[in-house]
Image: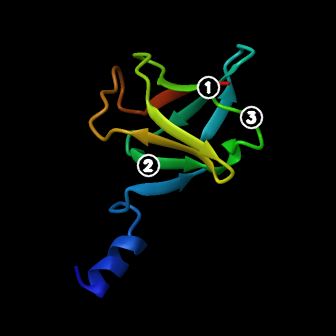
Amino acid sequence: MTSESMTNELMNPSTTKIRTLEPIIFYSGKDDELQIFLNEKEYGELIIKSLSDNQLKVKEVFLQETNEKLEWKQDYKGLRISVPEGLEISGSSMGRVLKVTF
């Protein structure tokens, strides 16, 4: 890989697999759960800075529609969630909702 192609890959967010997001996060009504809205194009390694481990301690991350557990890691930089590209979205193609329990 040339330095030019590496620079283009780093500057083009559509080709970069790790992205920092500021998604819509809302309270689900349950004492220990938040929901995160992602559009259909948000996949790969997603970092949500506002959910760092100094804010709250995450226990699990699920896809709301199927309760499929997603891989995640939380540290001082935020909550990093691995969202597979081929993840099915039932209904409309408007996006998906993740459940975060703490």
Callout 1 environment at 10 Å: few (<14), some (14 to 19), or many (20+)?
few
Q: What's the residue at 69%, 46% (across, down)?
A: 50
Q: Quadrant of the C terminus?
A: top right
Q: Nearer the viewer, mark 2 or mark 1?
A: 1
Q: What's the residue at 38%, 69% (across, down)?
A: 12
- The label on residue 45 is 2
| Colour convention | rainbow
Q: What's the residue at 37%, 62% (across, down)?
A: 16
Q: Earlier in the sequence, mark 2 or mark 3?
A: 2
* Relative vertical location of residue 76 with respect to residue 5 in this rendering, above or below: above
Do callouts 3 and 1 mark residues in contact (Cβ within 8 Å)? no
* Relative vertical location of residue 44 with respect to residue 11 in this rendering, above or below: above
Residue lying farthest to the left in this orientation: 1
- The label on residue 56 is 3
Helix, strand or loop status at disc 1: loop
Question: Which x, y percent locates residue 83?
Answer: 40, 39
Amino acid type at mark 3: Leu
In which image quadrant can residue 34 be found?
Answer: top right
- The label on residue 59 is 1
